[in-house]
Image (cartoon, helix red, strand yellow):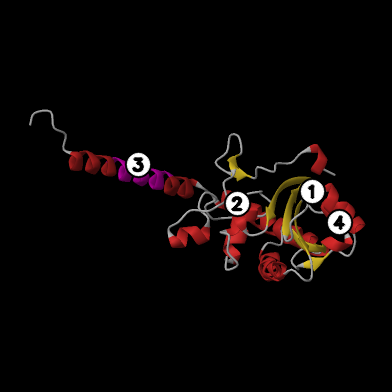
């Protein structure tokens, strides 16, 4: 029929145009490299070396602050020191007799070693009644995420982790990344465990204004800042 559009031809033309643009970009990058002299290349090398040294120094500073190990905060007063000294904090409020706390311990110990940029720790809820009251912690286990001394959200029980005891470490990592308290290279919009099963997560966050990321409904408030 007259007026019909050959979809295949249109898509083929679009692919050719995209390939042409990519080829031109690669050609431009090659030409830029060819125009560089030894001084330019040396400057690039120096910048990369400086960046590597800075990263090593930052990691050493994190380790001095106790990052890299899943540690226990012995008392309430120390909790405030931890949140003051570390920009990114993940703290698990636990009880010895609560089985699900042991499950979280296992996953958080793994993440502590992986994410040196974040202070991952725990505190016995029965030894810090003032803190639990101030943070309105009523369910154990509860994990609180803190960035720059401001509360960014809570993981209460396992509801946000697929509502199962068998959630993966990657699922918890993804959930913590919603609060931007650790470096995450995955897709924040796709929870790992549900992606594997082709389902959807129980966690429904709201987008951070101007970004494609999400944050808890329990956003930071003045009551939760210190």
Residue range (magenta): 17-28
For marks 3 and 1, give the CA distance: 55 Å
Label 3, on which residue? 21
Task: Tell me, yes or no, whether the two marked residues, 3 and 4, touch with CB atoms within 8 Å.
Answer: no
Q: What SS does tag 1 mark?
A: loop
Residue 211, numbered label = none
Main SS, magenta region, reads: helix
Label 1, on which residue? 136
- The image shows residue 66 at horizontal and vertical percentages of 81, 64
Please tell me which residue lies in front, 185 or 104: 104
Task: Tell me, yes or no, whether the two marked residues, 3 and 1, touch with CB atoms within 8 Å.
Answer: no
Q: What SS does tag 4 mark?
A: helix
Disc nearer the start of the sequence (3/1): 3
Residue at the limit of the structure toward the right, as seen here: 77
Front disc: 3 or 1: 1
Answer yes or no: is residue 118 visible. no
10 Å neighbourhood of mark 3: few (<14), some, or many (≥20)?
A: few
For marks 4 and 2, give the CA distance: 42 Å
- Residue at screen point 83% across, 53% down: 132
Disc nearer the start of the sequence (2/3): 3
- The image shows residue 68 at horizontal and vertical percentages of 74, 66
Residue 44, numbered label = 2
Label 4, on which residue? 79
- The image shows residue 30 at horizontal and vertical percentages of 43, 49
Q: What SS does tag 2 mark?
A: helix
For marks 3 and 4, give the CA distance: 54 Å
Q: Tell me the quadrant of the picture where the C terminus can be found.
A: top right
Disc nearer the start of the sequence (3/4): 3
Left or right of 92: which side holds 82?
Answer: right
Disc nearer the start of the sequence (2/1): 2
10 Å neighbourhood of mark 4: few (<14), some, or many (≥20)?
A: some
Left or right of 18: which side holds 90?
Answer: right
């Amino acid at each position: 029929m007259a007026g019909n559009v050959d979809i295949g031809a249109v898509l083929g033309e679009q692919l050719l145009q995209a390939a042409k643009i990519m080829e031109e970009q690669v050609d431009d990058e090659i030409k830029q490299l060819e125009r560089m002299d030894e001084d330019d290349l040396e400057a690039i090398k120096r910048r990369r070396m400086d960046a590597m040294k800075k990263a090593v120094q930052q990691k050493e500073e994190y380790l001095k602050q106790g990052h890299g190990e899943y540690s226990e905060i012995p008392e309430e007063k120390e909790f405030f020191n931890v949140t003051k000294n570390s920009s990114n904090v993940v703290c698990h409020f636990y009880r010895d007799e609560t089985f699900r706390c042991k499950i979280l311990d296992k996953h958080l110990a793994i993440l502590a070693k992986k994410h040196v940029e974040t202070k991952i720790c725990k505190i016995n809820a029965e030894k810090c009644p003032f803190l639990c009251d101030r943070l309105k912690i009523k369910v154990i286990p509860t994990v609180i995420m803190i960035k720059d001394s401001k509360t960014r959200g809570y993981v209460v029980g396992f509801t946000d982790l697929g509502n199962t005891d068998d959630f993966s470490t990657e699922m918890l990592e993804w959930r913590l990344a919603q609060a931007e308290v650790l470096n995450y290279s995955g897709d924040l919009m796709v929870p790992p465990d549900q992606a594997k099963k082709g389902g959807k997560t129980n966690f429904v966050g709201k987008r951070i204004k101007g970004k494609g990321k999400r944050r808890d409904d329990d956003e930071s408030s003045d009551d939760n800042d210190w």
